[in-house]
Amino acid sequence: MNNPKAIYERPLEEMIGKLLEMGIKDFSVLDAMRRVPRHIFIDEALRSRAYENMSLPIGYKQTISQPYIVAKMTELLVRNSAKQNEKFEKILEIGSGCGYQSAVLSYFADEVHSVERIKQLVSKARENLSDLRIHNVLIKNRDGFEGWDEEIKYDGILCAAAPPEIPKSLLAFLKVGCCLVLPVGGSKSQKLKIVTKTKKGFDEQECENVSFVPMLGGTSK
Ligand code: SAH
């Protein structure tokens, strides 16, 4: 059992079993979750817990999201888009953290643009993704409320930090028929929401209760 890959194979399969049990149905999502080794993203001291269904600290008062939440948000994003069975051109992610969700999203788009307000996490996420030879995720140290670039429209936007209300600035970056998946609310009560851009305006759906770190304005150098 000296091969690290072999050591984590069983816990990874158990994690996939748990995701199925918890209601994740999309096999392309389960497959992407199977392809991303979560232990790579976690400090050595906590690595033995890498495949437990829980969020874990990654430094700078931030966490890596719970595997169920990563799978659920990815499923909502790919299933609620007009482009359901096609690969997306571009996905925008807000809050790269250590890059775990970005790695999962990399299997669903030609390009993932991810913004993170904490500079040190930008470097950490870039390193993790480069170790996994994932080259279609670009990460920028930027305030997510501003998106990536005003000119680009996305097939899907996933926001991994909770703003107090739906940011109108992000909705402007969506293509028609595509959606923004995000937690909304304060520290006491947050709901996962899907906002779809229609020809006439926006459609809003509310899903389950969640608990995310807050989406803060500005960047931290
Ligand atoms: N996607 C991560 C989870 C990251 S936690 C995963 O795969 O596990 C949320 C991240 O959002 C934190 O790293 C936090 O620094 C970042 N964040 C909070 N507000 C932000 C903002 N306005 N712009 C960009 N990133 C933000």
Image (spheres, grey):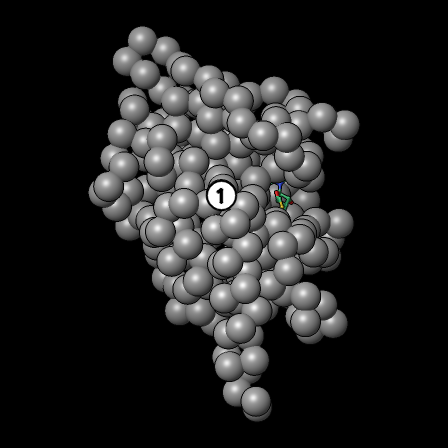
Q: Where residue 50 sits in the image (x, y, percent)?
A: 63, 65
The residue lying at 57 percent from left, 36 percent from top is 143
Q: Residues within 10 Å of mark 1 (few under 14, many from 20)?
A: few
As drawn, is 78 to the left or to the right of 117? left
The residue most toward the top is 200
Q: Where residue 76 sits in the image (x, y, percent)?
A: 43, 36
Residue 188 in the image: above or below residue 66:
above
The residue lying at 69 percent from left, 56 percent from top is 56
Residue 150 in the image: above or below residue 91:
above
Q: Where residue 55 sits in the image (x, y, percent)?
A: 67, 52
Amino acid under disc 1: Gly
The residue lying at 41 percent from left, 64 percent from top is 35
Q: Secondary structure at mark 1?
A: loop
Look at the image and tell me whether residue 140 can be seen. no
Look at the image and tell me whether residue 94 can be seen. yes
Q: 183 or 17, which lies in front?
A: 17
The residue lying at 64 percent from left, 30 percent from top is 209
As drawn, is 149 to the left or to the right of 124? left
Residue 212 in the image: above or below residue 49:
above
The residue indicated by pointer 1 is: 23
Q: Quadrant of residue 174?
A: top left
Tell me the quadrant of ligand 1: top right
The residue most toward the bottom is 2
As drawn, is 98 to the left or to the right of 198? right
